[in-house]
Amino acid sequence: MLKDILTNSIYLALTSKTSETEINEIRFRKDKPISVLCNTRTYFLSENGICSNANQAIYASEEMINDIVFKACNHSIYSVNEQLKQGFLMVDGGIRIGICGEVVLDQCIKTIKNFTSLCIRLPHIIKNASLPIFNEILNNGDINNTLIISPPGAGKTTMIRDLIFQFSNHNYSYNVFIADERGEITCGNASNFIGSNFYDAICFLNKKDSFLLGIRSMSPDIIVTDELGSIDDFKALEYAVTCGIKIIATMHANNIEDLKRKTEFKNLLEQRWFKRIIVLSKENGVGTIEGVYKENLSKIYGAIIWN
């Protein structure tokens, strides 16, 4: 966890006034104050813990940033280069480290070097997070194709982890396949987040190939995937739906109006393949359910807080 990737002095400062369970993310920017998002509020990190005064903050150095990256990859950048090319590293326990720096190009991205910024995002277990909307997804034994949308950091991945957990916990006999392109759903000690049964997963592979592989090899009833975005993602999803497979997916969008403006999504929206659309926000804390919508975008209900 954090203790394994941070220096002892930074870790002790970080946990002197708060615990890992309260921390959402930590940002290291070269020659800038270290910032900590804790319970949806942003603080600075001082030698005595989190604080509100930037003048007391510890500044991130190039050496500090490099040290975190090298610890996160067990001192072998080469072994994690496929992740690094996508701008992140996954660490045991489901921690995700977003990385900025100098991109090395040769027709495509070869790697990132000379790191300048890190965003360490910590996953959290919120058991039963999906229960307020679970009956909208499972309808008389049938699964509604479901899209969960929100801005970044509002609880999409937490929600789908708990949905998978609920299927496992209730012993439903569905074959769940997880197309986990970024490793955020299943990476680390996944059983703590999503249960130990009733799912198969492919990690760090694009959705197009993951869907094809999963459908051919695992005969899934449900495919769960995170962060739809590219045209290939939507084509893969269309293919799965025409094969009779149910979909639970997430996507970045602030609200329904924002979703309507996404041209890549237009075909799926017009054909009403998603029977339920769940909108999350941070309005009243991470995981606020702003609304549950039908395929025609009529609102069923909303503003529920599950944390």
Image (cartoon, rainbow, N blue to C red):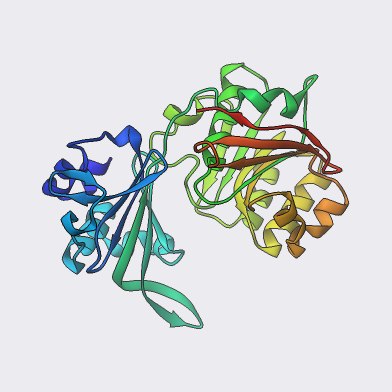
Give the residue displayed 42% in from the left and 60% down from the top.
Answer: 83
User: Residue 43 versus residue 182: which sits nearer the camera?
Assistant: 43
Q: Position of residue 37 (x, y in %)?
A: 36, 46
The correct choice, above or below, for 291 with respect to 205 in the image is above
User: Residue 44 versus residue 158: which sits nearer the camera?
Assistant: 44
Q: Report which quarter residue 243 is drawn in.
A: top right
Q: Report which quarter residue 22 is drawn in.
A: top left
Q: Position of residue 144 (x, y in %)?
A: 77, 33
Q: Report which quarter residue 206 is drawn in.
A: bottom right
Give the residue displayed 36% in from the left and 59% down from the top.
Answer: 80
Q: Quadrant of the N terminus?
A: top left
Residue located farthest toward the top when viewing the structure as drawn = 170
- Is residue 75 among what the camera can see? no
Instruction: Classify residue 299 as left or right of residue 108.
Output: right
User: Residue 237 versus residue 31: which sits nearer the camera?
Assistant: 31
Residue located farthest toward the bottom when viewing the structure as drawn = 106
The correct choice, above or below, for 136 with respect to 71 in the image is above
Q: Position of residue 28 (x, y in %)?
A: 28, 59
Instruction: Classify residue 291 as left or right of residue 150.
Output: right
Marks counted in the figure total: 0
Q: Position of residue 210 (x, y in %)?
A: 61, 51
User: Residue 295 versus residue 106: which sits nearer the camera?
Assistant: 295
Instruction: Classify residue 306 as left or right of residue 8.
Output: right
Give the residue displayed 27% in from the left and 59% down from the top.
Answer: 69
The correct choice, above or below, for 278 with respect to 238 in the image is above
The correct choice, above or below, for 256 with respect to 307 in the image is below
